[in-house]
Image (cartoon, rainbow, N blue to C red):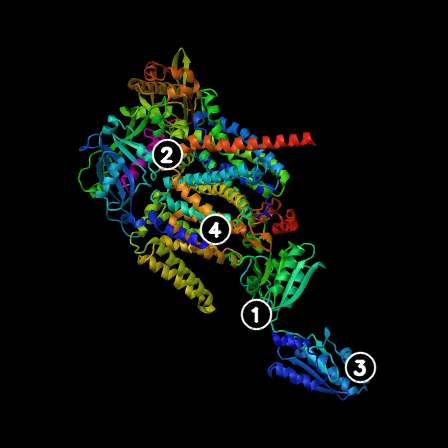
Amino acid sequence: MSNVKIDGYQLFCLIVLFLFGTTIFLDIGSGAKQDAWILTLISPFAGLILFTIYYQLHKRFPTLPLTEYVRKIWGKFLGSIISYFYIIYFIYIASRVLRDIEEILINSAYYKTSITVVGICMMLTLIYTVNFGFEVFARVACICFLLIGLTLLIINIMFIITDLIHIENLKPILADGWKPIIKSLPLNVTVPYGELITLSMVFPYLNKQTKILKTGIMAVLFAGIYFTLNILLLICVLGTDVLSRSSFPALKAASFIDIAGFIQRLDSFVIILVVFLGFIKITMFFFCAVIGMNTLFKIKSSALSTYSIGVIILLASIMIAPSYQNHLDEGLEIVPYLLHIPLQIVIPLLLLLTVLIKGRIKNVIT
Amino acid sequence: MKKLVTLLFILMLIPGCSNYRELNQLGLVIAMGIDVSKNIENGYRVTFQVINPSQLSPTGATTGIPVSNYTAEGETLVDAYRRASIIIPRDNDVTHLSLIVISEELARKGTNLIFDAFERGKQAKTTFPVFIARGTSAENVLGVVEPLESNPTKSVRSTSENNQKYYGISKTIPSHEVIATLSSEGKDLLLPGIKLNKKLTSKNQTDNLNNIKPSVIEVSGLAIFKKDKLVGWFDGENARNANLILSELDSTSFSIPCEKKYMTLITKRSKGNIKTLLKRFPTLQVNIALNTEISEVNCNKDLTDTKVLTDIENDLEKEIIRQVQRTIQISQGTGTDVFGFGSSLSKENPRYWKKHKKEWNTIFSKAKVEVKVKASINDSGLVTDPYEPK
Amino acid sequence: MSGENHNHIIPLSENVEENIEKLEMALGKSDDLSIRRLNVSAKNVAIIHIEGIVDDQSINENVISPIIQLNKENHPFKSTKELADKIVQILSVASIEFIFNWSDLLENILAGDTVILVDDSPKAITLGTKKIQSRSITEPTTQTVIKGPKDSFTENISTNISLVRSRIQNAKLRLKLTKVGNVTKTDVGIMYIQGNADISIVNEVMSRLEKINIDSILEANYIEEAVRDNRKTLFPLMQSSERPDVVAANLLEGKIAIIIQGTPFVLILPVLLIQFFQSPEDYYENNAFSSFLRLIRIGSFLLNMYASAVYLALITHHQGLIPTTLMVTLMAQRERVPFPAIIELLLMELAFEVLREAGVRMPRAIGPAVSIVGALILGQAAVEAGFVSAAIVIIVATSAINSFTLPNTNIVNTARGLRFLLIFSSAFIGFYGILLLTLCILVHLCSLRSFGVPYVAPFAPFRMGAQKDSLIRFPITSINMNDTEGNKETKTK
């Protein structure tokens, strides 16, 4: 995998699609009600700070993935434990996203199919992809970006044509003040922006190292602006009451589209997008887990780790929660505080501080 | 190892075909009629209208009726739907559900959370319209095939749509809007009513098809809901005016008196706008703008004279103001804010709204109403003056 | 093989009769071996060639008659060398070479050269008198256009080279010839334009050609299968064309052409997926119109691949997605059909494949009859008898017609293969299956390389400049030919 090279545009597509992930279908910022769009407008800036931390760390170890430089910075023993945690984290998040997709499918078109079957089908595709390596995946992302962009554009145009947009749904602005916005900010920064921690596993494979920062910033801002437009659209179409009650607002909104009684049920288009974007997101975590495993345990054949991690993700996706409601609760109440914040924010920040202080000490000594 | 895992996965996939259904095993439910159950307390009596595809074959001549109605009772809708399998021979499919009819009796008792099943359900879409069977049961309304349309579902929908195009009593309200209105603050629900114009003369449906004056679907007013309970009706003109206020009117006609006879103007474009002004007490303000066209004159008027036209415009405006005020008074009388004055207030003035939303219905009933109408005549048809019998 | 190596070291005998005897032995006394013995200044001279692959007239006029004339003049020659030199001087043949060993002798005779053996001389004179019977240049049969050049390649390599050379009269057009095939010794030529083509790819092609170890090369596909990058793919990794204008255009874009003796199809490489949707006509018509046609072709390809799978998914898994009126019509049609939808669809697809195969194999005179019987009568009867529904006939026929819009047959076969895979996955789990298989196809496409160039090149990796001639075609003046498609990709490599 060492000779894999990816250019700036591919990185841009990859980051944007990764950020889109499942986020644009789930209810983001519901705590802020009709002001959710303000929230999505602010959170990318917090995301940028995180991205800069990851980038600064990478700049100091340009050839190593996260799981490797942790060991360089904090020593073999502690570093290995932390790397191990990261691998588990990547696997866990991958299975969470897989579960999201399984649920969305089971809840829409496949109400009679078992969740296992849906999961296995996806996993076969994922393993097939991961076997080809990261470079191929980056190219797939590049093509998917064009396809997904086009589909999103069509759906959004349909909303406008069908006259479903009720701008008055946005009023009143900031009726409850800034409190609810600030309250739900951490949740909106960790997912999806904090998940950019995965990038620090793949940075070493990038072609033009100088462009990473610029491309990353552009991608994060682009995603942030799209999220804002998207949530504005959803609020205008659904209204805050329906928005907060539906599990998959984007599906609901798309199902309202009905042009001349012929173009209808566009929610199936949305499901196509869910599968595509979910695929990109899971593959990304999958790759990180495989890279981490290979470097940590010095495994030579990728196939072994790919297949074993694949099976684990699949099984975990089915077993992590007994019901969808449980799954959502875990995602909203436990995962952010127990996993996201420590692993996405605290550890990278501490790592950076250690590196900076070590550098200082060295400077002083010399 | 690779091949083994792949093979294992594929083997596990084999039971996955459970979603596979053949078209000729399907019973397509296109309409549901919901009545009050006779046997189960607080239960529903649901009529499912199922398409009979062999009667709609493009090649063979059709002889029979293209739909069959199956009725079942249950504690909830889904319960009835499942129980209906004792009589429906095919795999029910509600993905093509395109009409819901609720009986007035049930609506008066309260529709409650009747729409939950559709919103929660994984199959049905929520774009189908909802109607109220006025003074009769939903079962009866769905039980008549009229000569012009292939099935009752289609006749309900097309009669309603046609009326919207020409007069504007009825309107099509998709169920997701019903849910949105029920769950939102400051706006009550209006649902279109339908009934049969006369009772079926014979039990045999083909008799109705061969009758030159068949019994057919008739649109009949708009049902006024207070929360989820039906409390009254807008009839004829009032229903039309309600749509005018809500800016949901395609076209309609107004007749105004002239020299003991009448003249008729049809509207080409109309826009209604509501606002709630807050000066100590809320004032309900309605602004309506119309473009009209003179299409029939049964009296002698010099239509070439612009002054005469201005007079007619004024007469029309006065007439509309009178009608709209009457319509709003009906709404105030029942104490239900079907036009969304409250919702408008909550957006313009969230603080006041928060304080007074509990007693809004009483405030609304007593509020002053201001109606402003701007009507203009663009066109007087192909002739200027009416002909004079000499 | 071993005999050949053995021959390689064996020098020619100085006795003509001995040589002839040995030659006859080597060729198994083949009856088309023609030997003309002459006597010049008391020396034995033999003129040897194989009938049918040489220019008889040229041999008679330019070889035999000057030698007889020489004999008549009765020169006194001091040595054999002098005689041989004299013979070389009086022959009016364009190319003359000397050979010294057996393997060259055999090879040259078999290639259509004429060999002159002279007594007491250690070397043989070979004369380039090759003339292979070939048909004349005709209109292309598989890649036709309405407007544009009407010539096509033939089975003769030199004719083919001349067709390309006449289009690109430039000193930078290079040709390298080699022989491939242990038994057939087929002439294979590599053409490229110096400066446009990536020289590392040219070298790569040369080395791959040299490594080919198969007995025979009878058609372009033999080479294609032997040198392509990825053997486990349904997608064509080389383009084959019988149109000289296509080859010339590709050479100008920096591609490399492999011309093979014995087939009118010339291989072009490296190739990109998008090229299979580009017809030469795109450049001979107004660019707006040809862009439209190009999009139509891509749409047709997708329809051809997906139509039946999507239909199956709709009627067996996602009935809710069909508009109600259409749904009722479909239900009415399927009411009497005895087969499950998947069987019905597979039957019709296979029936179509059979019809297509029959159409190709049928003698030309009754070809149309097959299509009439097959398509019209059988289809109509099957629907009326209630064996299949009318909708499925429409779907299969539509997808078939769509396949005919593509200018290149290689990719159509790919679509045929994938179509069946898609049908199975669709029957299994509906749109989800189609979607996942599509993802797999995408991943597979992205993993493919044609001689090092990414197969989906102008899209991934994305090149803005190359978009001017990928999905749509900009005016020719605005396309920088050197900047198109894979070329840039190969240069940055």
State how far apart marks 3 and 2 are (Cα). 104 Å
State how far apart marks 1 and 2 are (Cα). 66 Å
Q: Is residue C42 above or below residue C466?
A: below
Under circle 1, the secondary element is loop
Q: Amino acid at mark 1?
A: Ser
Under circle 4, the secondary element is helix
Q: Amino acid at mark 4?
A: Leu
Work out whether mark 1 precedes mark 3 in sequence or the reverse, and give the earlier one: 3
Chain letter for mark 3? C
Magenta stretch, overall SS = helix
Q: Residues within 10 Å of mark 1 (few under 14, many from 20)?
A: some
Work out whether mark 1 precedes mark 4 in sequence or the reverse, and give the earlier one: 1
Label placed on residue C302:
4
Chain letter for mark 2? A
Q: Residues within 10 Å of mark 4 (few under 14, many from 20)?
A: some
Q: Circle 3 sits on which residue?
A: C82
Q: Amino acid at mark 2?
A: Gln
Label placed on residue B15:
none
Magenta-drawn segment: B150-178
Chain letter for mark 4? C
Does B165 lie within the magenta span? yes
Label placed on residue C216:
1
Which quadrant of the figure has residue B269? top left
Q: Are marks 1 and 3 on the same chain?
A: yes
State how far apart marks 1 and 4 are (Cα). 36 Å
Q: Amino acid at mark 3?
A: Glu
Residue B319, image x, y percentages: 35, 20
